[in-house]
Image (spheres, grey):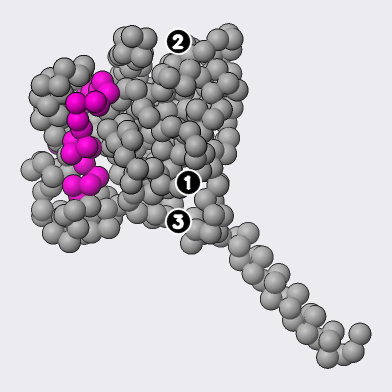
């Protein structure tokens, strides 16, 4: 090989190596501030009797963690795997399933936050799926909706493997996850909300919704609050203020997608009314349509109550009873 050819070869090799190295070292921006440890430190000052709900696998439950449900191609951060943690009853059979969406202001949080509740529900006979989705520092609205719809399709594609009854799939979410659960569940059959994030060819339809302290209507006065800072979590996620993006604020509000074919909804509330914006109006609409709704409230001034005892067990019981009542009809 001539000296010039060798030099060209070496240069090409170096450039390709640098490109490969850049791709393999891509770091997705994350806000890790919302986690159980930080919340415990915050809340313990006011509620010294609380205990963190633990990640402990119950007897009779099988776990499959970090399962890839889709791979997003050519994102600004390269090819991107998204994962679920699945908890299934060991006993053979077909079980109702619940996809569980964590909170964190659409910016922070992790699917691990849902695991204690997921494990408890699995021990009662519900297949639970804790889902990872793209947060606002990585992708704005509606990417998370597309992610979660894809995960529901993955559940149906893999129903046999995980003992899921594909006709009985519900969704739950906490805080920002509650808002997402509501939006995903109320947009059954809406093609513009499906996205193309994988598992196409299967239905993303939801049969029941559990909203734990999640906003229903971004347009409600208590939610809109036009004096908020530009770095407020919803403004960041929706890509602008209400004045800048009014159509997106409406589009992301689950209440505007509700109709006479919507599925039953369970609300579990804290003592902070601002997290229930639009709830009463939606319940009124659903009563008109004859759609079942149920509301439970913990009269306590703590938002992430589902992370702690003594509230995690009654929360799980409310969810289980609602699912059995509405999915086994």
The image shows residue 11 at horizontal and vertical percentages of 74, 81
Front position in the image: 238 or 56: 238
Image coords of residue 138 (percent x, y): 42, 55
Query: Label 2 vs label 3: CA separation?
Result: 37 Å
Estimate the x, y position of residue 276 in percent, counting from the top left.
17, 32
- Counting from the top left corner in percent of width and height, residue 323 is at 34, 15
Q: Is residue 118 above or below residue 180?
A: above
Q: Earlier in the sequence, mark 2 or mark 1?
A: 2
> Relative to the observer, which residue lies in front, 177 or 283?
283
What residue is disc 3 on?
29
Q: Which residue is mark 1?
A: 197
- Range covered by the magenta-colored residues: 249-274
Q: Is residue 214 left or right of residue 122?
A: left
Please tell me how crowded label 2 is: few (under 14), some (14-19), or many (20+) other residues with Cα within 10 Å: some
Mark toward the start of the polypeptide (3 vs 1): 3
Residue that lies at the very extreme toward the right in this rendered image: 1
């Amino acid at each position: 090989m001539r000296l010039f050819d060798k030099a060209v070869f070496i240069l090409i090799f170096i450039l390709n190596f640098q490109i490969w190295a850049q791709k393999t070292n891509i770091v997705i921006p994350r806000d890790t501030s919302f986690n159980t440890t930080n919340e415990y430190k915050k809340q313990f000052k006011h509620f010294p009797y609380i205990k963190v709900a633990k990640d402990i696998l119950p007897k009779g439950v099988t776990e499959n963690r970090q399962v890839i449900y889709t791979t997003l191609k050519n994102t600004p951060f390269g090819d991107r795997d998204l994962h679920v943690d699945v908890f299934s009853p060991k006993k053979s059979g077909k079980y109702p399933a619940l996809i569980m969406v964590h909170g964190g202001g659409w910016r922070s949080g992790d699917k691990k936050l849902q695991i204690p509740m997921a494990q408890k529900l699995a021990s009662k006979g519900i297949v639970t799926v804790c889902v990872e989705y793209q947060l606002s520092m990585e992708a704005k609205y509606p990417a998370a909706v597309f992610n979660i719809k894809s995960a529901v399709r993955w559940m149906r594609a893999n129903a046999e493997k995980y003992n899921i009854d594909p006709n009985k799939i519900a969704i739950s979410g906490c805080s920002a996850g509650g808002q997402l659960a509501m939006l995903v569940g109320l947009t059954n059959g809406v093609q513009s909300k499906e996205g193309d994030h994988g598992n196409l060819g299967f239905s993303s339809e939801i049969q029941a919704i559990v909203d734990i302290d999640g906003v229903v209507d971004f347009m409600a006065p208590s939610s809109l609050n036009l004096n908020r800072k530009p770095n407020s979590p919803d403004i960041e996620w929706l890509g602008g203020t209400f004045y800048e993006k009014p159509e997106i604020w409406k589009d992301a509000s689950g209440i505007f997608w509700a109709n006479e074919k919507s599925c039953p909804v369970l609300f579990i509330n804290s003592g902070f009314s601002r997290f229930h914006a639009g709830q009463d109006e939606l319940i009124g609409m659903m009563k008109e349509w004859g759609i079942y709704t149920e509301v439970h409230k913990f009269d306590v001034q703590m938002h992430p109550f589902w992370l702690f005892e003594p509230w995690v067990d009654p929360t799980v019981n409310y969810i289980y009873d609602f699912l059995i009542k509405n999915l086994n009809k």
